[in-house]
């Protein structure tokens, strides 16, 4: 997915750019305005704000957590198999432990991700730190 950013000091300019993009066939649902002042963006009903979930790295962290959880669960089952622990007892506690590992790691990483900005937003952070700078995110 390619992302294009238009940076401006004026929301009216971004509204004009959005209209031009709509005339070229890009729907308004694909463009979002990123600003540190959400109230000012909300005053322009034709502009879409960036959702709070997209401002953080929650989606990426969930995917990474799921992969790490699968690796941890698979490793644990493999180690139990090699050590022969399931022969002395049963597989049930180890399977439940593997499910707990797999399920808890994505949730843990999501909680950590609420404080991490997405890569796209990190690139725009220095521009947005100035007052009244807005970015149209397509």
Image (cartoon, grey):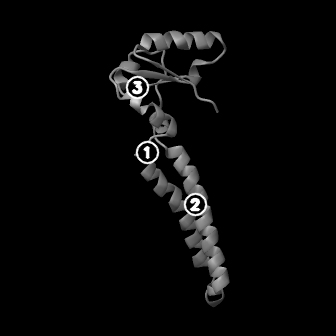
**Secondary structure found at label 2:** helix
Query: Which label sits on residue 116?
Result: 1
Tell me residue 28's x, y (percent): 57, 18
The answer, for residue 113, to whether it is visible in the render is yes
Q: Nearer the viewer, residue 121 or 90?
A: 121
**Secondary structure found at label 3:** loop
Whichever of callouts 1 and 2 sits on the residue coming sooner in the sequence is 2
Neighbour tally class for label 1: few under 14, some 14-19, many 20 plus, Cα within 10 Å: some
Whichever of callouts 3 and 1 sits on the residue coming sooner in the sequence is 3
The answer for how far apart the CA atoms under marks 1 and 2 are is 18 Å
Residue at the disc numbered 2: 68
Which image quarter: residue 101? bottom right
Q: Quadrant of the C terminus?
A: top right
Furthest-left residue in this view:
131
The residue lying at 43 percent from left, 52 percent from top is 112
Whichever of callouts 3 and 2 sits on the residue coming sooner in the sequence is 3
Establish if 108 lies above or below 98.
above
**Secondary structure found at label 1:** loop
Q: Nearer the viewer, residue 119 or 54?
A: 119
The answer for how far apart the CA atoms under marks 3 and 2 are is 33 Å
Establish if 27 lies above or below 54.
above
The answer, for residue 91, to whether it is visible in the render is no
């Amino acid at each position: 997915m390619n992302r294009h950013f238009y940076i401006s000091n004026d929301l009216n300019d971004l509204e004009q750019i959005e209209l031009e993009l709509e005339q070229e066939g890009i729907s308004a649902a694909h463009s979002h305005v990123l600003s540190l002042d959400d109230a000012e963006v909300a005053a322009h009903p034709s502009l879409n704000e960036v959702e709070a979930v997209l401002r953080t790295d929650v989606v990426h962290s969930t995917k990474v957590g799921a992969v790490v959880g699968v690796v941890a669960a698979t490793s644990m089952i493999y180690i139990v198999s090699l050590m022969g622990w399931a022969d002395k007892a049963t597989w049930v506690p180890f399977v439940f432990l593997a499910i707990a590992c797999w399920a808890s790691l994505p949730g843990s990483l999501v909680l950590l991700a609420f404080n991490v900005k997405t890569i796209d937003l990190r690139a725009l952070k220095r521009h947005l730190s100035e007052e009244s700078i807005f970015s149209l995110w397509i």
